[in-house]
Image (cartoon, helix red, strand yellow):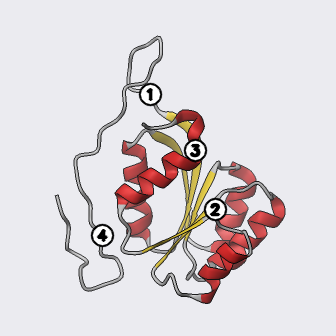
Amino acid sequence: MLTDHFKNSKLFFNFYLPFFLKKHDSDSGGFGMLQQKILIVDDEKILTELVSEALFREGFCNIEKACNGEEGFEKYKRFSPDLVLMDIEMPVMDGYESSSRIKAFDPEAKIMVITGNAYDDRARRTLTEGIAFKVLEKPLKLFDLRRIVRENLPALSLA
């Protein structure tokens, strides 16, 4: 299914459905939920919800959300996620500042920037300064997001 409801805004996404939960090799034989923790920091509520739902359908059940950089930093300290998906342009505190604080707090933090403008100086600086390992540009392709999450959380791979 291809959605085009937001085609004329920066909230345009291509979603290809269906998503499938992977069978987990557990004694119960049920569908397993992956235990890695993911923090999504973005002020665009619809994006946060869509990404959260897509990751949940991939088996990730430990997902927290924050609507600005300051809240994201505070949640990082309490939640200790394995991966952070960080927008750059947000109110209160932007994603560059939040990501910088997260890296200062935890140098091992894995941060992926998701931005509407990959040429934004702050987005590029997250890469050149070693704050983020990847910048994805909106409109977001969930196939790419899924692949990158899988590659960077290898202990419980979705493959």
Q: Is residue 106 left or right of residue 119?
A: right
Instruction: Identify the mark nearer the N-term, 1 or 4.
Output: 4
Q: Earlier in the sequence, mark 1 or mark 3?
A: 1
Q: Give the residue displayed 38% in from the left and 20% down from the top.
A: 30
Mark 2 or mark 1: whose residue is earlier in sequence: 1
Where is residue 36? Give x, y as percent: 58, 41
Q: Amino acid at mark 4?
A: Phe
Q: Badge 1: how crowded within 10 Å, few (<14), some, or many (20+)?
A: some
In the image, which is nearer the foreground, mark 1 or mark 3? 3
Q: CA distance from mark 2 to mark 3?
A: 12 Å
Give the mark nearer the N terminus: 3 vs 4.
4
**Label 1 residue SS:** loop
Q: Tell me which numbered mark, 2 or 3, is placed earlier along the sequence.
A: 2
Q: Which residue is mark 3?
A: 153
Residue bearing mark 4: 13
- For the point 34% across and 35% down, the residue is 21
> Where does the image place residue 73, in percent across and percent down from the top left?
71, 65
